[in-house]
Amino acid sequence: MYLSLGYGAYKWTVNETPPPWQPLRKPLAQCRLALLASGGIYVAGQTAFHYKDDTSFRAIPRDTAVADLRATHFAYDLTDARRDPNVVFPIGTLRGLAQEGVIGALAGHAYSFMGGIYSARRVTEELAPALCDALEREQADAALLVPV
């Protein structure tokens, strides 16, 4: 896949140590949950993602209608995601869980980015810190990462 985009052979990142574990400090039913997804989802009217090393993300208001969500990605078949974005961006399911009291609330925005970014360095130095800053502003207690 990366060769067809003009890159060299991909070298997978190997993390020698596990990430630090942080247990929840309160029950999930009291937590503000943020959704992070790598499926290239955006809202109609927002700029679509670029296929080549796009380290930007889209903030999607939690009350956005599913019908207004769009998908673009170079690394997976978009048929099902375009039919129902919830398969890669389960905002509707999470809204239901919030209404049922399973989770306390959804953060004001969900965040989507383009998975398959070739440069692990750029993910580490650009995308991850920007997403962490956004989650801090949202005062999220926990995040659900939906990788594609």
Image: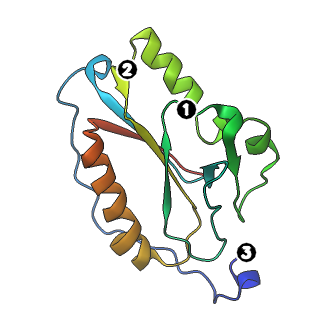
Which residue has dot 2 on it? 103
* Apparent side of residue 126 relative to residue 119 in the rendered image (left or right): left
Compared to 52, does 110 lie above or below?
Answer: above
Residue depicted at 65% across the width and 87% down the height: 7
Q: State which tag comes first along the sequence, 2 or 3.
A: 3
Residue depicted at 26% across the width and 35% down the height: 141
- What kind of residue is marked 3? Met
- Give the camera-side residue of 11 and 48: 48
- What kind of residue is marked 1? Ile
Task: Determine crowd level at label 1: few under 14, some 14-19, many 20+ residues with C-alpha closer than 10 A.
Answer: many
Q: Looking at the rendering, which quadrant does residue 86 occupy?
A: top right
* Apparent side of residue 45 relative to residue 94 in the rendered image (left or right): right
Residue 53 screen position, x and y as percent: 57, 76
Q: Nearer the viewer, mark 2 or mark 1?
A: 1
The N terminus - image quarter:
bottom right
Compared to 22, does 103 lie above or below?
Answer: above
Which residue has dot 1 on it? 91
Q: Looking at the rendering, which quadrant does residue 106 occupy?
A: top left
Q: Can residue 35 be seen by looking at this rendering? A: no
Residue 79 screen position, x and y as percent: 82, 46
Instruction: Tell me the tag on residue 1.
Output: 3
Q: State which tag comes first along the sequence, 3 or 1.
A: 3
**Helix, strand, or loop for circle 1?**
helix
Q: CA distance from mark 2 to mark 1?
A: 13 Å
